[in-house]
Image (tube, helix red, strand yellow):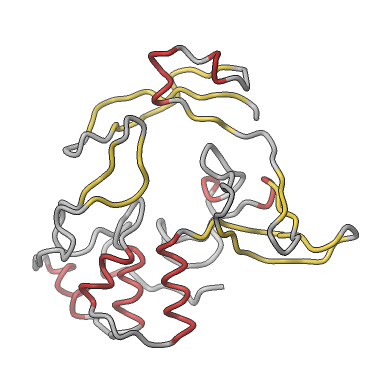
Amino acid sequence: MLWIEIPQVIGRNDDGVPIFNHIEYRIPSSRTADIPSKDRWRARIMWRHFYGFTNEDIFFDLSGYHELDFGINLTCDWGVYANHMGGGYDSRPHEGQLIAGIVVNSPKGKKFQKWFIVTPELKFLIELVHAGKTGLTQERLARKLLTDDCPDKLWALVRLAFFDNVQVFTDQARGVTSVHPCMGELYGRVYPGGRRYSVRHDGMYLSMPAAQVRPHPLP
């Protein structure tokens, strides 16, 4: 690991989740004992390098970490922005997590040229695509696909691809409100301090205006 970062807290949202801004200071150490006790709850470890092997003996390392774009332009393709590549404090997969990507042959065996962490919500979406159908309603799917950041990004894809539901996008673009099926429910990662976001919005919470959502096929 390269260093430990302490982000600046500039406030909290209605759920009590800290709102972070720029890095307040860095600790040039790999020891958590070097973090002042008052700042340990918001400390983030930034990895300089890591590597590992999947259960199928496929090699992966930090240099191959490359997220898919499900948030900025919603292309569902490899992200082209800097924050999609090179990793960070949450890019090192934990034991048991799924990763996926492009596998190539190397002199030392198979390795991931590009890879990303498969969240449970994304895994469920991929399984839906493979099945080509679903018996669940759009409301039930909203709960299964609620995810980090812009929480309805995967649900929006399913509503287009499986239900041809263009009306909800048209309504949202026109400002027509609809009660979210998951109103009040918690979602996404646990932030420093043990807080999580809850659904407090109508319609769909997306990274772009609803009229601009034109996703490309999954790679």
Tell me the residue at 24%/27% (across/down).
11
Expressed as whole percent of the image width and height from the top left, the position of residue 92 reads 59, 44
- How many marks on residues? 0
Expressed as whole percent of the image width and height from the top left, the position of residue 7 reads 42, 25
Q: Is residue 151 above or below residue 169?
A: above
Q: Nearer the viewer, residue 106 or 194?
A: 194
Tell me the residue at 43%/61% (across/down).
120
The quarter of the picture where the C terminus appears is: bottom right
Expressed as whole percent of the image width and height from the top left, the position of residue 16 reads 21, 34
Q: In this view, does 75 lie above or below 27?
A: below
Q: Which of 3 and 82 is in front in this view?
A: 3
Q: Point out the residue furthest to the right here.
A: 107
Tell me the residue at 55%/15% (across/down).
33
12 vs 175, left or right, is right
Expressed as whole percent of the image width and height from the top left, the position of residue 53 reads 72, 54
Q: Which of 44 and 168 is in front in this view?
A: 44
The quarter of the picture where the N terminus appears is: top right
Tell me the residue at 55%/20% (across/down).
32
102 vs 99, left or right, is right
Q: Is residue 2 above or below residue 28?
A: below
